[in-house]
Image (cartoon, rainbow, N blue to C red):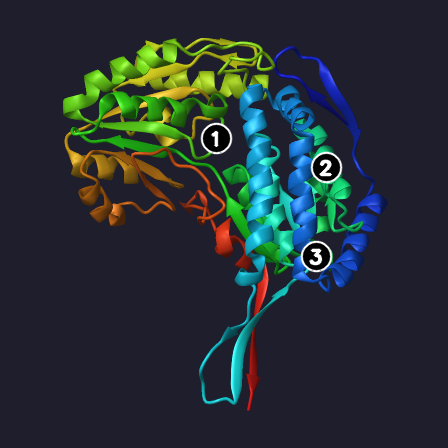
């Protein structure tokens, strides 16, 4: 099959990519198994040198890599450059910390000696999305390769160019052949890849539908899976919050990457006393944002990654308004562009509350008080993260248990950090990425016992 990568800003073809044949896929999978047998024996110190070289390669080619991100999925160029820098950071983080993470754990038992050692498992197959086409991959690849495993990437079809460049990064850094391979493979090849003997685990970042399908295949073939799926994060504002500072955080939390982020704030749950002031200042701030060619410096909003995604968001806006939401700002769509949009008086029965809105749409929701705000936050099928904004940080800390999501941020937008575990609950997925937790997901914690 021939696949075209299309620039969402101007409709131009960025690249043309041919899907691998079944024979080519199996050849790469076999090569992955062979690479693992030798890569697992490479000392951690040598792996760390190579991973630091990958970080250097990313920084040296940052402009080129960022331009490919922007051309393929429309992210503003400044944000694309920041994404490359974050990839370099995660490479350095694991290069510096893996020796400690994988150190043997001595456990006192009635044995002469008992311990837990940490061994790699084999090839990890990653199915990755288009919205952060470099970061999502390096978030998996850095801990996976540093642990002694090998990686296989099946990227989203609209960012195949990014997938090719990521493989190039590892090649330029000096990683042995087969340790990281990019597979341009059709969806119907997924099961053949998962069931291959070299593949020991699957990690997916994507939609609920994709996660369900891949997890089912992994379960069928008794392969471990990790899922990071959609989100509808609540951004809760208490009456004592610093509204001006909170609005700045809120706009960034919603509009970063033109709103195309699973951990973006999507439901703004505002305690009654500050609702009007917050909404007014939020709209004022959004009006100041510039939208246009994402390659032009200064533009903060670009097109959505594809026209159909903009159409889907437009349908959610329309259906929410028909259900009683108030259109306060924006609301129009043109090809892949969708205006930043603010809906007021959103209630739990509306699409803007119930569904994940993947674009620059902010749903404003009234809460009677703090307890009601947490109830509204929990009234979602998603469970990635929640932000709470208040001056009473001790009270906010004491209420972290009220949230069932995988993250709870106070006076800050929900974000990923290599030093902290990342992942969700409910239909937002299972398992954790980043920090030591992310490395342990694909490790054989082996008990060693000497009588």
Whether 153 is drawn above or below 31: the answer is above
Q: Sequence order check: which comes first, mark 2 or mark 1?
A: 2
* Image disc number at residue 261: 1
Q: Nearer the viewer, residue 333 or 431?
A: 431
Q: Residue 53: which disc? A: none
How far is mark 2 from mark 1, CA to CA?
24 Å
Q: Quadrant of residue 127 in the image? A: top right
Mark 3 or mark 2, whichever is nearer to me: 3
In screen coordinates, is 329 left or right of 26?
Answer: left
Mark number, residue 186: 2
Callout 1 environment at 10 Å: few (<14), some (14 to 19), or many (20+)? many
Q: Is residue 216 among the parts visible in the rendering?
A: no
Q: CA distance from mark 3 to mark 1?
A: 35 Å
Write the residue at 27% across / 26% down. Answer: 347
Callout 2–callout 1 Cβ contact below 8 Å:
no
Vertical side of 103 occupied by 450: above or below = below
Name the secondary structure under disc 2.
loop
Numbered disc in front, either 2 or 1: 1
The image shows residue 200 at horizontal and vertical percentages of 66, 58
Mark 3 / mark 1, whichever is N-terminal = 3
User: Is residue 49 shown left or right of residue 345?
Assistant: right
| Mark 3 neighbour density, 10 Å: few (under 14) some (14–19) many (20 or more) | few
Helix, strand or loop under label 3: helix
Q: Nearer the viewer, mark 3 or mark 1?
A: 3
* Secondary element at tag 1: loop
Q: Position of residue 391 (x, y in %)?
A: 19, 34
Image: 65 above or below 421: above
Identify residue for label 3: 46
């Amino acid at each position: 099959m021939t696949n075209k990568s299309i620039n969402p800003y101007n409709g131009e073809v960025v690249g043309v990519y041919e899907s691998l044949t079944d024979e080519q896929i199996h050849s790469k999978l076999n090569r992955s198994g062979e690479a693992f047998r030798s890569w697992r024996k490479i000392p951690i110190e040598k792996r760390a040198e190579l991973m630091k070289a990958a970080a250097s390669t990313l920084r040296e080619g940052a402009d080129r890599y960022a331009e490919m991100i922007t051309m393929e999925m429309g992210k503003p160029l400044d944000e694309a450059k920041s994404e490359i820098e974050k990839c370099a950071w995660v490479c350095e983080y694991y290069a510096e910390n893996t020796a400690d993470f994988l150190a043997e754990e001595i456990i006192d038992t009635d044995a002469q000696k008992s311990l837990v050692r940490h061994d790699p498992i084999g090839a990890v197959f990653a199915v990755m999305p288009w919205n952060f086409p470099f970061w999502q991959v390096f978030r998996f690849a850095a801990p996976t390769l540093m642990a002694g495993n090998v990686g296989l990437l099946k990227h989203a079809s609209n960012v195949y160019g990014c997938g090719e460049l990521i493989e190039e990064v590892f090649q330029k850094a000096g990683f042995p052949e087969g340790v990281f391979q990019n597979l341009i493979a059709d969806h119907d090849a997924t099961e053949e890849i998962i069931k291959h003997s070299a593949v020991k685990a699957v990690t997916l970042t994507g939609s609920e539908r994709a996660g369900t399908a891949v997890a089912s295949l992994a379960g069928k073939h008794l392969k471990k899976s990790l899922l990071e799926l959609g989100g509808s994060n609540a951004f809760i504002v208490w009456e004592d919050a610093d509204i001006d500072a909170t609005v700045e955080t809120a706009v960034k939390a919603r509009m970063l990457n033109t709103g195309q982020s699973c951990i973006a704030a999507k439901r703004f749950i505002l305690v009654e006393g500050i609702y009007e002031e917050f909404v007014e200042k939020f709209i004022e701030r959004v009006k100041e944002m510039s939208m246009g060619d994402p390659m032009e410096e200064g533009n903060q909003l670009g097109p959505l990654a594809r026209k159909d995604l903009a159409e889907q968001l437009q349908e959610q806006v329309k259906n929410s308004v028909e259900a009683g939401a108030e259109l306060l700002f924006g609301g129009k769509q043109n090809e892949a562009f969708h205006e930043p949009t603010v809906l007021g008086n959103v209630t739990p029965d509306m699409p803007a509350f119930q569904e994940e809105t993947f674009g620059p749409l902010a749903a404003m929701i009234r809460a009677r008080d703090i307890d009601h705000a947490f109830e509204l936050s929990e009234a979602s099928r998603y469970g990635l993260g929640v932000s709470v904004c208040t001056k009473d940080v001790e009270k906010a800390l004491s209420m972290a248990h009220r949230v069932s999501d995988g993250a709870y941020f106070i006076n800050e937008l929900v974000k990923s950090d290599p030093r902290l575990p990342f992942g969700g609950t409910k239909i937002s997925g299972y398992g954790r990425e980043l920090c030591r937790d992310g490395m342990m997901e694909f490790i054989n914690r082996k008990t060693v016992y000497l009588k």
